[in-house]
Image (cartoon, rainbow, N blue to C red):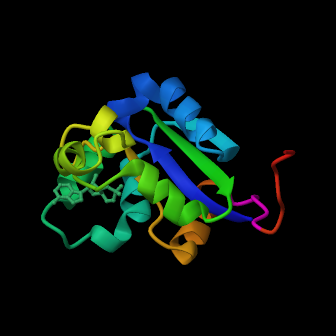
Amino acid sequence: MEHTFAMIKPDAFENADEICKIIEGADFKIAEKESLTLTPAKAKSFYGEHKDRAFFSGLIEFITSGTIVAMVLEKENAVVDWRSLLGPTNSKQAEEEAPDSIRARYGTDVQKNAAHGSDSPSAAEREIKFFFPEFDLTETHRTS
Ligand code: CMP
C-alpha cells in the first residue's frame, strides 16, 4: 500500500468537504487530515525546492493567505493516482485537458490551483514527515 501527501490550498478550502468526497470516491483512504494556516517560515521550508523561481514569493503569499488542509492519502499507486485526479498543475490547462480533474473544477490558474500532490514516492515520504512526523508509512490504515 502506498501513501502520498495531499494539500487543499486556501483557494479551495471552501470546497474541502466536496474534494474529500471525491478523494474517497476514487478509493483513497484519508489516513490523516489536519486543517491549519501555514506560517511564512513553514511555507518557505515546504516549498524550498522552488526558492529561486520567479513565482516563489507569490506562492508563499498565496499559500499563507488562508486555511489549508494537509492530508495523507493511502491507496495502491497513491502518488500517481492522486496526481492524475488533480490534473495538470495549471488549472487553465486542466480545464482544457482534464475537465473533470480537481484543478479544473476548483482552481483558477497556475498559482491558484486548488490542491497539491507529491510528485514522487520520495517526495511523498518527505512531505508526509514534514506535516505528520509521527506517521508510520509502513502501516496500512484502511479497513476495507
Ligand atoms: P504545487 O503542485 O503545489 O507545486 C508548486 C506550486 O507553485 C504549484 O503547485 C503552484 O501553486 C505554484 N506554481 C507553479 N508554477 C507556477 C508558475 N509558473 N507561476 C505561479 N505559480 C506557480
Q: How far across and how far down the image is residue 69, in percent?
A: 52, 38
* Observer-nearest of 96 and 82: 96
Q: In this view, does 88 lie to the left or right of 84?
A: left
Q: Quadrant of the N terminus?
A: bottom right
**Viewer-proximal residue among 65 and 119:** 119
Image location of residue 106, percent across then percent down: 32, 33
Residue 69 visible in the snapshot:
yes
The outermost residue toward the bottom is 122
What residue is shown at x 40% (from left), y 45% (from top)? 115
Quadrant observed for ligand 1 in the rendered image: bottom left
- Using the image, determine if residue 14 lies above or below residue 107: above
Most common SS among magenta residues: loop
| Farthest left residue in view | 54
Q: In this view, does 119 lie above or below 107?
A: below
Quick check: is 135 in the magenta stretch?
yes
Residue 14 included in the magenta stretch of the image? no
Q: Which of 90 and 50 is in front in this view?
A: 90
31 displayed left or right of 64: right
Asked whether the viewer can see residue 127, the reply is: no
Q: Residue at position x 56%, y 40% from top? A: 23
Q: What stretch is highlighted in magenta?
A: 133-137
Residue shown at 60% from the left, 60% from the top: 78
Residue 98 image offset from top left, x and y in percent = 29, 48
Q: In which quarter of the image is residue 132?
A: bottom right
Q: Compare residues 63 and 105 and report the one nearer the observer.
A: 105
Quarter containing the C terminus? top right
x, y percentage for residue 109? 18, 44
Number of on-image labels: 0
Q: Is residue 101 above or below residue 84?
A: above
105 with respect to 82 (left or right): left
